[in-house]
Image (cartoon, rainbow, N blue to C red):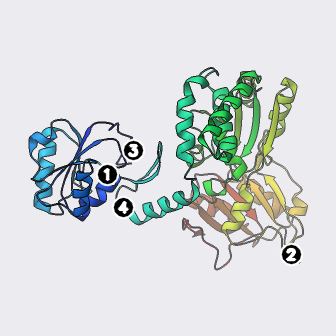
């Protein structure tokens, strides 16, 4: 990002604004929500600005801005709607070392003012770095509709109660207390005094409550697109103390974890560098015994080729609780990417999920059954095993024209589709030089007019 979002302390401090017309008026409506000292410099000013000055909400000086006006200013706005006058203000601001915003001139501004959702003291700032103000307004409108007007009241009551809440130990117990208030009892209360009583009762209950034992949620992260993450998975990430994740989990999904959460990458790579499973098991138990709420985040669905059983058995032996949150597996995302279905009446009444290799090397399967006409299989981790799979299937009578489709980075913005046949599989795969995670669909070819994702992924047909 080119603009780093911050909340600047302005209570009792001067903000200067040069201009008295429509642009100045728009900025002042926002600035007057703050507790800053607002000084406006304009020989001529809109009647509403004059009224604000008369009411004591700002100071209006009927002259142009001078350099000495910026001695104690923290920000200055150039809103003259005249390039020459605004340029002069910008030079004065630069000389005084005060950040300047020139209205409607992003390139020359030292800062920008975001769209704001105001539930004082809760403030949400929405910025698009000047590229899409219409989008910023749409997001603001959406948030305004979703957020209760009473949100600010709840926050103000909580602010007065923070010293009392310090009786709870820092960390999860204190977070659970505030979560119970803001997401539970608080929004149901009608009056400020009711909110204060509710906080007293909540604090008493949380002080008596025992610390939560460590717990592990095995969460399927889906194929990579954060929009395919389930709501239950989002909630788990939002409350996790520790996230132990595979290498296949995308940065966009990890961004959804709490900022304070500890993120630990225990990625595995077929025929490459990997974290030993025993080390992963020990890591999960170690954090759970400290009372952490853990998300064990696995690419796709945690129950499909994720060595879930070994980790659950380790937790059961250690007496640690757990639950599983399913996710969208790569096979579902891949078949959707080529506009096909895994089963079809009259073609195949079953589908196989296979792995191209296991702990001992290339995996063996019922090749005779797979070689029959119209069979469909989703083959995970099949890139390096492609020649082995081709040989076994042809040996057992599969047609050389059997379609095979590889989908790399299914559902992601860099998705690629490589369509080939069993006969040409190794050569076409080598030409494609797939580098990301890829799944092979045996027996399926992309539809002629295949569905496209919002991201318009690249389609490559060999």
| Sequence order check, earlier mark of 2 and 1 | 1
Q: Residue at x 75, y 50 (%)?
A: 301
| Sequence order check, earlier mark of 4 and 2 | 4
Left or right of 70 in this view: 379: right
Looking at the rendered image, the disc whose residue lies closer to the viewer, 3 or 4, is 3
Identify the residue position indicated by label 1 in the image: 112
Label 1 sits on a secondary structure element that is: loop
Report whether residue 272 is seen: no
Front-most of 430 and 95? 95
| Sequence order check, earlier mark of 1 and 4 | 1
User: Between marks 4 and 2, how big is the CA–CA gap?
Assistant: 50 Å
Looking at the rendered image, the disc whose residue lies closer to the viewer, 1 or 4, is 1
Front-most of 83 and 405? 83
Q: Quadrant of the rendered structure where residue 284 is?
A: top right
Front-most of 109 and 46? 46
User: Between marks 3 and 1, how big is the CA–CA gap?
Assistant: 9 Å
| Sequence order check, earlier mark of 2 and 3 | 3
Label 3 sits on a secondary structure element that is: loop
Whole-percent x, y for residue 289 in the image: 75, 22
Identify the residue position indicated by label 3 in the image: 5
Identify the residue position indicated by label 4 in the image: 131
Q: Looking at the rendered structure, which numbered label has been put on residue 347?
A: 2
Q: Are marks 2 and 1 in contact (CB under 8 Å)?
A: no
């Amino acid at each position: 990002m080119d603009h780093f979002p911050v909340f600047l302390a302005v209570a009792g401090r001067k903000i200067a604004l040069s201009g008295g017309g429509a642009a100045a008026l728009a900025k002042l409506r926002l600035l007057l929500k703050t507790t800053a000292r607002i000084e406006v410099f304009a020989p001529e000013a809109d009647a509403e600005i004059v009224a604000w000055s008369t009411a004591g909400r700002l100071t209006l000086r009927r002259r142009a801005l001078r350099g000495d006006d910026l001695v104690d200013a923290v920000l200055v706005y150039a809103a003259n709607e005249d390039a020459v006058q605004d340029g002069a203000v910008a030079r004065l601001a630069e000389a005084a070392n005060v950040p300047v915003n020139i209205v409607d001139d992003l390139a020359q501004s030292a800062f920008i003012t975001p769209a704001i959702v105001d539930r004082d003291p809760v403030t949400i700032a929405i910025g698009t770095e000047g590229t899409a103000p219409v989008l910023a307004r749409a997001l603001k409108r959406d948030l305004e509709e979703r957020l209760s007007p009473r949100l600010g009241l709840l926050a103000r009551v909580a602010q007065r109660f923070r010293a009392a809440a310090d009786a709870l130990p820092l960390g999860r117990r204190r977070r659970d207390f505030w979560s119970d208030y803001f997401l539970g009892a608080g929004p149901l209360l009608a009056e400020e005094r009711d909110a204060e009583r509710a906080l007293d009762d909540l604090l008493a209950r949380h002080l008596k409550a025992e610390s939560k034992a460590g717990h592990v949620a095995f969460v399927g992260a889906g194929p990579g697109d954060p929009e395919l993450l389930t709501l239950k998975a989002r909630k788990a990430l939002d409350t996790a103390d520790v996230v132990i994740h595979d290498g296949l989990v995308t940065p966009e999904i990890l961004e959804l974890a709490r900022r304070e959460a500890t993120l630990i990458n225990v990625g595995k790579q077929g025929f490459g560098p990997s974290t030993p499973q025993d080390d992963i098991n020990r890591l999960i138990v170690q954090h759970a015994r400290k009372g952490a709420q853990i998300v064990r985040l696995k690419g796709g669905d945690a129950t499909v080729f994720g060595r879930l059983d070994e980790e659950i058995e380790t937790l059961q032996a250690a007496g640690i609780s757990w639950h599983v949150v399913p996710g969208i597996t790569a096979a579902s995302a891949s078949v959707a990417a080529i506009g096909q279905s895994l089963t079809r009446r009259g073609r195949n009444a079953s589908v196989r999920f296979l792995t191209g290799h296991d702990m001992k090397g290339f995996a063996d399967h019922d090749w005779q059954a797979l070689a029959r006409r119209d069979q469909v299989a989703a083959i995970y981790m099949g890139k390096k095993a492609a020649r082995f799979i081709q040989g076994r299937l042809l040996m057992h009578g599969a047609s050389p024209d059997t379609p095979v489709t590889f989908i790399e980075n299914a559902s992601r913005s860099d998705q690629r589709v490589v369509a080939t046949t069993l006969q040409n599989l190794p050569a076409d795969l080598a030409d494609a030089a797939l580098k990301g995670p890829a799944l092979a669909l045996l027996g399926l070819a992309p539809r002629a007019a295949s569905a496209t994702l919002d991201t318009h992924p690249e389609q490559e047909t060999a």
